[in-house]
């Protein structure tokens, strides 16, 4: 069940009505109901993998309790490593085994050894990277005694499987979500309205921006050798907006849906294309993953403390892991390393925390310097996206060399005016909403209802006009 | 919460009303089209005795007006360039739903692409989009998953992006439709270099089951309504695929199949063709004459 389908549009209101009207007085009953709905939601993808989700949930729940109850440090360690090991093994088998097998085979062939390693013919369970990371953070927090393990199995299972975040995040923390699931939730008009705004804006970004850009990005990337430099550049731009619209749109729908149930999820995007440097970009792009790696990998490795070598090593590890998390392909690894390359100079110059507040916070428009900074950062990330999008490293390199050719200064063969206007509209709305958690947060909530409804109707009209009869997958579902 | 539900319902009601303003585009879209044949069918204005169905080979190579004057039976060409047998079946089904049934259907066969996937032969959804104001068309679009059930409630969900235009659709250079629905060619296509198509071995394993089903359904529809079908193989400057022909004869009565006169020298001249598969008007007259003679000799319309 995709977020951008009629099925989901019917599913959410039904869940909403039962949740508040029928079960509104008992948070326990609400949790049980949400859990059942979440399992139903997951089963709609592929019921075969529900067992894996249940097993992973049970393993982490039991491991955490055993770590808490055990007086021996040795036993605690055994439970901890069992849980971590099994979780990572699942991820390794389903997501990375074939990559390692094929890479190993190629490496051995270079050495003259022709060994035929077994390649698995399995599909990747939807959301495995996300719910595994939920479980890992929980077990690590309990082991480090930063968190008291949850006794209520329903609340814990809901934390792992809550349907808005189950298949593509945001990657939640037990410390943030579990307390919300334990307390009685009261309905808030403002929160629910904001939830609807966020869903509508998310759908706009997915259907109107991402899916339209995808048409052109796919056409250009699939036909790259025949295209001029300027057209290839347009293709990279379209992909930059496609992936932003797709993933931030998904996150907005997830967060908005959750708001309808009185549950706030972690913010995942904060206008990343308005960043003035790469460090700021990573504080604003896929925030829940960046902060996960920061808290569970980067800081334990020493963070930005220590020698220059250690700093560079830690940054490289974190970006390499980030790339590898996205998929078992060298293109993702190079994408991550390229970002490390962008980031290291800022870290060494101690400028990585220079831009904390959103750009032009107290002004309407950015200064010339800020425009240049944002433009440069955007172009750098766009260049890196080429590796993310390309099917192979050689294809990415050919694509980039195609851009930096004399034909870069010709008129691109693909220049759809309607899509460019829509992108401009999206950027404008996001610019004026950049001080909020999402572009339409509290949009004119105290103002004229006619203006508010007119604007939302306009967005809905665009969604209707641009919606495709064919279900369009979200890019991050493959991760 | 009551306030939230109330406001949500009010908003939806308002949006529902706003949506209805888009009926203008729905209503206006058919008037912008130059090809009004499908709309004539839906309006019940297609009451002819002989109907020609097919792809561009039917549209360009068969002159319905000539058949009408020779057989003295009203004839109309409902062939759509780029359409496949699924679309031909849909056209005939629509004719029977809204019009008097014809006595005969001349079905043009695309040798050898009739049943296999061919990127230039499809179900012509683009012919249906401008007619989305008709429930029958919307129903078909929903059935084929081109639209969803929201189309029953929202005009916006029925509309296609191309329907937002206010200017008339330009008639393509070779797309002029005569009074009998045919589209004869009067010139040679610039890119036609006269090469013959290479001969492929016809592989029935590659056949599309949907196309086979549609073909059989079309036959069944004609059988039920006592409509005579004539299966026509038009001339091609490319090779005639005998393997496909043999396969085709297993599906139809051989005496209802009409193949162009392969010995006629006019079909061997490059100058008779617009491109590999389409005749120019003068050669089309010759071919149409063959069809008329075939129909008359078989006494199908008596």
Image (cartoon, rainbow, N blue to C red):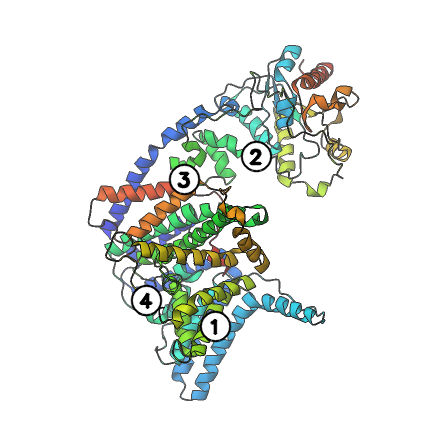
Q: Is residue A128 above or below residue A16?
A: below
Residue that lies at the very extreme toward the front in this rendered image = A406
* Residue position marked by numbered label 3 in the rendering: A465
Q: CA distance from mark 3 to mark 2?
A: 22 Å
The local crowd at label 2, few if under 14, some if 14 to 19, many if 20 or more residues have their Cα within 10 Å, is some
Q: CA distance from mark 3 to mark 1?
A: 44 Å
Give the number of marks.
Answer: 4
Which of labels 2 and 1 is toward the front?
1
First in sequence: mark 1 or mark 4? 1
Q: Left of A264 or right of it: where is B110? A: right
* Residue position marked by numbered label 4 in the rendering: A354
Which of labels 4 and 2 is toward the front?
4
Chain under numbered label 3: A
| In contact (CB < 8 Å): disc 4 and disc 3 | no
Looking at the rendered structure, the secondary structure element under dot 1 is helix
| In contact (CB < 8 Å): disc 3 and disc 2 | no
Which of labels 3 and 2 is toward the front?
3
Most foreground residue, A150 or B53: B53
In the rendered image, residue A54, in percent from the top left (x then y), is placed at 47, 68
Identify the mark at residue A317; answer none if there is no mark: 1
Do badges 4 and 3 share one subunit?
Answer: yes
Chain under numbered label 1: A
């Amino acid at each position: 069940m995709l977020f951008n389908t009629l099925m989901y549009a019917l599913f959410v209101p039904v869940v909403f009505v039962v949740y508040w009207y029928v079960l509104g007085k008992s948070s326990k009953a609400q949790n049980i109901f949400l859990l059942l709905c979440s399992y139903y939601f997951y089963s709609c993808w592929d019921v075969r993998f529900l067992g894996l989700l249940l097993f992973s949930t049970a393993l982490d729940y039991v491991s955490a309790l055993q770590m808490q109850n055990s007086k021996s440090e040795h036993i605690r360690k055994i439970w901890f490593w069992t849980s971590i090991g099994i979780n990572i093994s699942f991820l390794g088998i389903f997501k990375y085994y074939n990559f390692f097998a094929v890479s190993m085979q190629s490496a051995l062939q270079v050495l003259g050894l022709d060994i035929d390693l077994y390649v698995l013919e399995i599909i990747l369970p939807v959301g495995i990277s996300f719910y595994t990371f939920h479980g890992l953070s929980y077990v690590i927090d309990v082991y480090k005694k930063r968190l008291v393990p949850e006794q209520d199995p329903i609340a814990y299972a809901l934390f792992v499987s809550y349907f808005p975040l189950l298949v593509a995040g945001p990657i939640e923390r037990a410390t943030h979500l579990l307390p919300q699931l334990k307390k009685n939730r009261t309905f808030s008009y403002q929160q629910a309205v904001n939830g609807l705004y966020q869903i509508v804006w998310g759908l706009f970004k997915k259907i109107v921006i991402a899916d339209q850009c995808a048409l052109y990005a796919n056409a250009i990337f699939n036909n790259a050798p025949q295209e001029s430099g300027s057209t290839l550049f347009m293709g990279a731009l379209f992909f930059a907006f496609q992936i932003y619209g797709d993933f931030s749109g998904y996150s907005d729908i997830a967060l908005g849906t959750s708001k309808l149930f009185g549950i706030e999820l972690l913010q995942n995007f904060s206008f990343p294309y308005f960043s003035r440097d790469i460090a700021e970009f990573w504080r604003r792009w896929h925030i829940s993953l960046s902060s996960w790696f920061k808290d569970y990998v980067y800081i334990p490795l020493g963070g930005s403390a220590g020698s220059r070598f250690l700093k560079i090593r830690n940054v490289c590890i974190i970006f390499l892991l980030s790339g590898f998390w996205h998929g078992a392909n060298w293109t993702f690894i190079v994408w991550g390393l390229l970002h490390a390359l962008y980031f290291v100079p800022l870290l060494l110059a101690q400028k990585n925390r220079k831009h904390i507040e959103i750009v032009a916070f107290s002004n309407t428009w950015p200064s010339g310097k800020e425009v240049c900074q944002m433009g440069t950062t955007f172009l750098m990330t766009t260049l890196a996206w080429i590796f993310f999008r390309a099917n192979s490293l050689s294809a990415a390199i050919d694509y980039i060399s195609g851009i930096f050719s004399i034909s870069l200064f010709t008129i691109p063969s693909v220049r759809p005016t309607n899509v460019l206007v829509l992108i401009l509209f999206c950027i404008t709305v996001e610019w004026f909403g950049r001080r909020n958690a999402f572009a339409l947060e509290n949009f004119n909530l105290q103002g004229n209802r006619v203006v508010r409804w007119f604007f939302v109707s306009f967005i809905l009209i665009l969604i209707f006009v641009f919606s495709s009869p064919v279900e369009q997958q979200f890019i991050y579902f493959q991760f | 919460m009551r306030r939230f539900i109330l406001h949500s319902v009010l908003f939806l009601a308002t949006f529902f009303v706003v949506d209805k303003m888009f009926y203008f585009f729905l209503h206006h879209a058919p008037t912008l089209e130059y090809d009004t044949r499908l709309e004539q069918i839906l309006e019940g204005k297609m009451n002819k005795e002989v109907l020609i169905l097919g792809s561009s080979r039917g549209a360009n190579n068969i002159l319905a007006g000539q058949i009408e004057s020779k057989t003295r039976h009203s004839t109309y060409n409902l062939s759509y360039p780029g359409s496949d047998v699924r679309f031909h079946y849909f056209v005939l089904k629509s004719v029977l739903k809204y019009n008097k049934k014809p006595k005969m259907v001349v079905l043009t066969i695309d040798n050898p692409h009739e049943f296999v996937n061919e990127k230039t032969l499809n179900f012509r959804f683009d012919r249906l989009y401008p007619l989305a104001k008709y429930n029958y068309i919307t129903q078909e679009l929903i059935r084929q998953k081109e639209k969803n059930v929201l189309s029953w409630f929202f005009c916006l969900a029925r509309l296609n992006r191309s329907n937002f235009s206010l200017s008339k659709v330009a008639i393509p250079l070779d797309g002029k439709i005569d009074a009998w629905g045919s589209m004869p060619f009067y010139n040679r296509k610039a890119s036609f270099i006269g090469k013959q198509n290479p001969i492929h071995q016809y592989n029935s394993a590659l056949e599309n089951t949907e196309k086979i089903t549609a073909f059989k359904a079309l036959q069944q529809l004609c059988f039920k309504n006592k409509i005579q079908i004539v299966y026509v193989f038009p001339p091609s400057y490319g090779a005639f695929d005998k393997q496909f022909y043999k396969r085709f004869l297993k599906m139809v009565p051989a005496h209802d199949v009409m193949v162009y006169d392969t010995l006629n020298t006019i079909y061997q001249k490059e100058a008779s063709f617009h491109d590999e598969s389409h005749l120019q008007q003068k050669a089309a007259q010759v071919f149409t004459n063959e069809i008329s003679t075939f129909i008359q000799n078989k006494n199908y319309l008596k």
